[in-house]
Image (tube, rainbow, N blue to C red):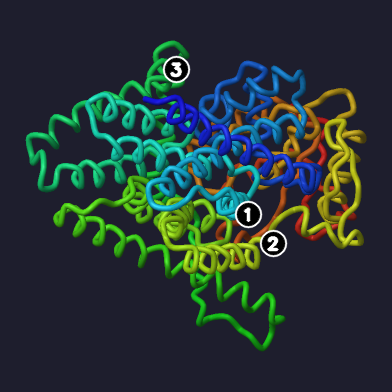
């Protein structure tokens, strides 16, 4: 290897990393102190705080898979803060890695086909950053990029070691999110079959699959270690898996926003086009997924080369389309879109300049048109919509409704739980506990799904033991479904609250049921 080659080998990753860091830094400076959600962001924040205090995700509180909590808690511990900005910085570091891997895949795809283009990488990085929404789901967004990178690494130069590494990445990704592990398994099997076509055959497929499977087992070993050394975690983890089968779904579904359903008469032109574009992306996901798999398979039989990143993206697009369709809103579309985006960007990158730039700028314009409305910084451009409020010693600009909710929670706490007593806030605002530095009295800190009578009785025992000073019940029909109100999903716990707490008058909202503990309440 010549000196020039070695320099170029190091240059590509360095440029990709610097670009990713600069893009994320600009995004942070623009909107890092903007927006806050007591809902999903609060769910992650509370979990990270509890891990810092020694609690275990899934076992001690309702949680995503453990990896993201230990990443966040380690970073927050390193900077000496359990506040919301420390959490966001931890997420941003993960985002840098996600964009870095994406840009590296694109740059290495361009290299054999066209002159290296820094400008194209900048536009590609901006597109990736635009779709990294919502903020608290950047772990999931980046994980799909890591899987694409791992499979691309395998496809570029198949070997026993690379099969093992690809499996290792799938296992590690599953430690952060088991759904990503399943998508990674599906995409990996597609790639393994593709690699065995017209070359190694069945015997080679089985042999390579064993190395890959060994990697998966090793990568997922943190879960085995937790089950082995943390009493009760194994049972809690299996219960969380069993719950998915009991519910027979992975999410609360929403109807797909097909472009032909857009009501242009009742929306502005900008919003109508935005909704139509969202619908177009929902169509493109499965169409591209099937088409790209068919195309790369035909190319394999014809023994024609295909960029490794495109092959990896092709086999991951359909599995991640499942996630987008599981709850067809903009957040889940974004979380299921990245293999598709990477496939598009790698395919565009190898075109001639006359075709490459119109295509990538069209993709960039479409992405900006859709995602600009959802970025926290854009939502607070109208200063009349947002107010400044202190959250964990940081000044954040949030919408007025969120600010009012935070002030309400603080007022209730100072009035009824000023001496550190526990509080109960259910079902939708787990961020209240992180905000007020309180331990949740229920395991189910985000009580979305109906649960069994036995489970509710266990939760009531926890509530009794914690003796909360007040209870806040958000009586809201999620997605307009009355069956998802707390009184219907957790009827025994709701009855316990109404029987053992005194309802306060003059609530600021009919949906806010506020109770204080009765004197006789144990």
**Going by the image, does 260 lie left or right of 463?**
left
- Residue 191: which quarter of the image? top left
Identified at 58% across, 25% down, the residue is 71
Q: Secondary structure at mark 1?
A: helix
The residue tagged 3 is 226
Quarter of the N terminus within the rendering: top left
Camera-side residue: 123 or 248? 123
Q: Secondary structure at mark 2?
A: loop
Camera-side residue: 46 or 331? 331
Distance between the Cα atoms at labels 1 and 2? 8 Å
User: Are there few (<14), some (14-19), or many (20+) residues within 10 Å of tag 1?
Assistant: some
Look at the numbered discs 1 and 2 and tell me whether their residues touch, using CB distance below 8 Å. yes
Q: Which x, y percent locates residue 360?
A: 53, 62
Look at the numbered discs 3 and 2 and tell me whether their residues touch, using CB distance below 8 Å. no
- Residue 389: which quarter of the image? top right
**Could you say which disc has been placed on residue 78 in the image?**
none
The residue tagged 2 is 372
């Amino acid at each position: 290897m010549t000196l020039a080659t070695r320099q170029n080998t190091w240059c590509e990753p360095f440029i990709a990393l610097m670009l990713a860091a600069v893009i994320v830094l600009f995004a942070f400076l623009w909107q890092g102190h903007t927006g806050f959600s007591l809902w999903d962001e609060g769910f992650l924040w509370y979990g990270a705080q509890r891990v810092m205090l020694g609690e275990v995700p899934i076992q001690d509180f309702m949680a995503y898979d453990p990896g993201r909590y230990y990443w966040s808690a380690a970073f927050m511990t390193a900077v000496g803060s359990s506040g919301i900005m420390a959490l966001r910085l931890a997420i941003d570091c993960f985002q840098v890695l996600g964009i870095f891997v994406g840009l590296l895949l694109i740059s290495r795809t361009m290299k054999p086909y066209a002159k290296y283009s820094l400008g194209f990488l900048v536009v590609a990085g901006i597109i990736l950053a635009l779709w990294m929404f919502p903020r608290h789901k950047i772990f999931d967004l980046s994980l799909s990029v890591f899987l694409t990178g791992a499979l691309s690494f395998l496809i570029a130069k198949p070997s026993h070691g690379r099969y093992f590494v690809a499996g290792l990445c799938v296992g590690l990704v599953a430690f952060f999110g088991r759904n990503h592990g399943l998508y990674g398994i599906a995409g990996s099997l597609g790639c393994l079959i593709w690699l065995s076509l017209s070359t190694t055959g069945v015997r080679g497929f089985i042999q390579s699959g064993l190395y890959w499977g060994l990697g998966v087992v090793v990568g997922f070993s943190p879960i085995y270690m937790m089950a082995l050394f943390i009493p009760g975690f194994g049972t809690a983890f299996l219960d969380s898996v069993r719950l998915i089968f009991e519910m027979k779904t992975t999410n609360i579904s929403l109807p797909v926003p097909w472009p032909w359903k857009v009501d242009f008469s009742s929306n502005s032109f900008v919003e109508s086009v935005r909704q139509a574009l969202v619908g177009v992306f929902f169509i493109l996901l499965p169409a591209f997924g099937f088409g790209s798999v068919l195309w790369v398979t035909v190319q394999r039989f014809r023994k024609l080369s295909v960029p490794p990143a495109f092959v990896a993206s092709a086999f991951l697009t359909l599995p991640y389309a499942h996630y987008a369709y599981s709850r067809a809103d903009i957040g889940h579309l974004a979380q299921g879109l990245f293999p598709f985006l990477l496939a598009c960007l790698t395919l565009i990158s190898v075109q001639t300049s006359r075709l490459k730039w119109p295509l990538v700028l069209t993709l960039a314009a479409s992405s900006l048109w859709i995602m600009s409305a959802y970025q926290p910084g854009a939502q607070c451009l109208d200063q009349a919509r947002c107010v400044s409020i202190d959250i964990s010693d940081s000044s954040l600009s949030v919408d007025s409704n969120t600010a009012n909710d935070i002030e309400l929670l603080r007022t209730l706490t100072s009035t009824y739980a000023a001496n550190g007593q526990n509080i109960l806030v259910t079902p939708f605002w787990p961020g209240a506990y992180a905000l007020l530095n309180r331990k949740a009295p229920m395991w189910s800190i985000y009580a979305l799904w109906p649960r069994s009578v036995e489970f509710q009785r266990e939760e009531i025992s926890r509530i009794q033991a914690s003796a909360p000073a007040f209870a806040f019940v958000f009586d809201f029909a999620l997605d307009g479904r009355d069956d998802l109100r707390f009184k219907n999903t957790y009827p025994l716990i709701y009855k316990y609250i109404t029987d053992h707490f005194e309802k306060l008058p003059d609530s600021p909202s009919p949906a806010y049921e506020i109770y204080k503990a009765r004197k006789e309440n144990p």
